[in-house]
Every structure is written in structure tokens, then in C-alpha cells.
Image (spheres, grey):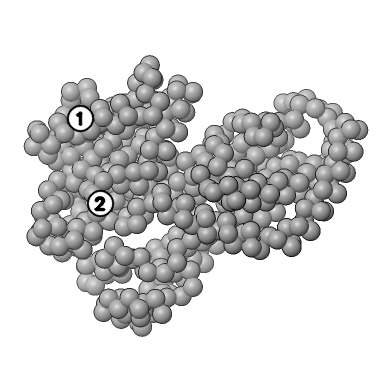
Amino acid sequence: MLPSRANRLAVRIGLTVLALALIPVALVGLSMSRSSEAAERGQLDAQVGLSLQVAVSAIEGALIAEETNVQNAARSSALVDAIRRDNRVDIAHRLPPGTTVTIHGVTIGQRPSVALTRSVVLEIGNRPLAVISSALPLTSAFLSQLGRPLPVAGTTFAVVTRFGKVVVGHDRGSTLPANGDVTLGGTRYRTYSAGLGRVPYRLQALAPERHLQHAVSTERKRLFLIIGLTVFVALALIFALGGSMLTSLRELFRRAEHADTDELTSLPNRRAFKEALTHEIQRAIRYGTPLSLTLFDLDHFKRVNDTHGHPAGDRVLVASARAVERNLRESDVLARVGGEEFAVLLPSTSGDGAVDLAERLRAALQAISPLALDVDEQITASFGVVEFDRNTDDSTGESLVAAADAALYNAKRLGRNRVASTSGAEHGESPSAAYTHRSPRL
């Protein structure tokens, strides 16, 4: 939770955005005739869906610019020379604005708290040397530029969520379903969402259900006029105080985001994984969908550190994370939960499907070239797989994690480089069945 001062600032900004959004509600309500709830809902779905598509297209266009920025930085001979010399002062001096360099597990440059990034790996021969990244910050101001807010369907507005929790926009800290109904501040909303690539962030729009259930009455029209006057006053206050408030919030968001991310691999850390696990368990219980968890541990990782040093170990960790990411769906959650231990949370996936995926991940890790990482140890991993039992009272996932950890221990006991599940089955180096749950990412 953010400090109370930050909560007050977020609520004030959120209420102002809501007040601004109420103005088009009055205008739309005056011209709307009475129609059935089904017709109203269909029109709302179409309008918000189109607006989300336009907003995501705008974000993709902005990411193309970030891609250009990071490519230009990678072609800068002065910056590349500073990276080769590992002169971090010179690297920081030559970094373009909004760009960071990660070298030997250390990130140089300012990284926004909530952002989409484009990265390029700088290699010397076939050896990764550093990662250059350019970030597109996701802020309330950026959301306003996308939709100001979404100009459709009455009071519809946009937020950014992480694992279902609002991190940018109105009612920050609230938990939202990807699609469905939710009650915020006594008002019931219909939510819509769109993914933002291979990251846990989603762009979501919220529309109040009351506009689907009732035609706009004369009393509401008067209320909209009052709200308009309130918005005018709120805008005057925002213009006077908004600059300092937004600066304070951006800094608090940056710190909160850093606390949930593993600095080396840029994956969610143990804390973020626990939040995601609790959230997905609640969804699995609510909607009756399967949920599986996979824990895997890199075999003999200590030997790599002892023989080649910690920089080599860092390269192995980063390469392993990227190899696994390429085989996951957008909805899957990959997190680094220990030194060389990772967790993969698999919503809507049965135990058999999770075992099939684990076999693919095991093969993907084994396919990494040790020469490219300047090590002589073949990368392998041991996997423990378990499916969540919805009939238990394990709301926090502690029993689920313990079962997956026991299966992982069994895989190591049986000789490592294999997959073990709570069903007692274990799988070695034989080819696995196709993973039918994989879907493309942005």
C-alpha cells in the first residue's frame, strides 16, 4: 500500500478524471432513446472494443519509436565503446534520455516505474555483453493522451492493471477482472481489457452498468449539470496543484514497481509471484477453471558460479529466463523466486497440459548454447508440476507451492534434467507432446 498522502492524491486525481468523464454522459443521455438492455450492452461493447483497439494501436506506434531509439543507441560507437570498457560513468553520460543499459546485472540509467520496454542484446562475437533498453512510460497523462479518457459510452475511462490490480489511473489499488463486472465506490462497472505484449500489464476500460439499465432521467440531467460545475472547479484545482501531485505519484509508483521486479531478469520477483498466485487462485475458484503451477531449478548452477564467476551465472539466468518466456502465453506468469529457482503460473491449464509445457521448457533450456554464454556447463533444469485442487481451502497457495516444491525435489532425486508431477509420473529427456495452450504474444 502507498502512504496515506499518496492515496489521497490518487483519489483526488481519480475523482477529477471521473468528473471529466461524466460530461459526455449528459450529452449522450440527452440524445439517446429508450432501448433494451441487450441493445445498450451491444453498443457499449462495440464502442469500448473499438476504442481499446485504437488505444493499443497508438501504444504499438509509440513502441516502434522506442525500438528505433534502442537501435540507434546500439549503433552509437561511443556508447558501445564505453560498454566494452565497462566504464559506467561514461555509459551514463552517453545514454540517450529514457534509455538504460544492463551490464553484469547492474542497470545504468533511470527506468520508469510502469513502462513497456524494447531491448537489444549487445554481443561481442557470440557472447552477450549488455542489454540496451528504451522505455515507454505508462502514466495517467499518457492514458489521457490515448483517450482523454475513452470518449465513448458515457463515463467510460481507461486504467492500466498488473495481475488484475490497478497501477495507473482511476481507483489505483483496486482489483479488476479482465472482463466482467466489478463494484467500485458503490458503483457497478463493466470491464474490458486488452493485452500490452509479453508483460503483466493490461489496458482496461470501465463502463458503468447503470447506463445499460435505465434511460437518462430528468434528475440525472440536472445531476450532470452539477457534475459539470464540479469538474470545472476540480480542473482549476488540478491546474494549480496537479504538477507537484503527479511528480510525487510518479516517484511512488516507480518505487512500488521496483519492489515487484527482479533487477537482473526483469521478471516478477517472489513478492509479485505471491500476489499473482493469490489472484489466480481466486479466479480459478470463482470461475471453476483449472490452474497449474510449475517450479523449476537450474541444475548445478553453483558450479557455474564457482567455475566461471557470478557474471557468467548472471548470463545463464538471463538467457534461461528469455528461453522460457518465448514458450509461454501472454496470460502465463514467469517469476524468479530464488537464486536459480523460477516459478511458472499457468491459468486455465490442467496438470497434463502443465507437464507437456514443462517438457518443452526443459528442452528449450537444454538447447541453449553454452559457448554463447562463455561457459562449459550444459544448461539443464529439474521441474516440479502440480495442479490446483479447487476443493481445498488453500486460498493463499501455500499448499500448492509446497506440493510443486516436493515434485521438484523428486525430479532432482531421480537424476535431474527431468519433469516430475504430484501424480507420481516423471519424465526424462524423451521428446514431449505439443503444448496446445501456447498463444502468440504482441
Please report whichever mark, 1 or 2, sits nearer to the chain's N-terminal start.
Answer: 2
Give the residue displayed 81% in from the left and 53% down from the top.
233
Give the residue displayed 37% in from the left and 73% down from the top.
74
Q: x, y (%) of residue 389?
A: 34, 21
- Rendered image quadrant of residue 334: top left
Image check: 373 left or right of 33? left
Three-letter code, disc 1: Ala
Give the residue displayed 82% in from the left and 53% down from the top.
232
Q: Regarding mark 1 in the picture, which secondary structure is present there? A: helix
Give the residue displayed 32% in from the left and 55% down from the top.
265
Q: Which residue is mark 1?
A: 406
Q: Is residue 211 above or below residue 271?
A: above
Q: Is residue 173 above or below residue 69?
A: above
152 or 433: nearer the eye?
152
| Residue 353 appears in the rendering | no
Q: Alpha-carbon neighbours of circle 1 within 10 Å: few (<14), some, or many (≥20)?
A: some
Three-letter code, disc 2: Ser
241 or 218: nearer the eye?
241
Outermost top residue: 391
Q: Which mark is residue 320?
A: 2
Outermost bottom residue: 78
Q: Is residue 435 above or below residue 265?
A: above
204 or 112: nearer the eye?
112
Q: Alpha-carbon neighbours of circle 2 within 10 Å: few (<14), some, or many (≥20)?
A: many
Q: x, y (%) of residue 221?
A: 88, 38
Q: Regarding mark 2 in the picture, which secondary structure is present there? A: helix
| Residue 279 appears in the rendering | yes
Q: x, y (%) of residue 91?
A: 36, 77
Q: x, y (%) of residue 87?
A: 30, 78
Q: CA distance from mark 1 to mark 2?
A: 22 Å
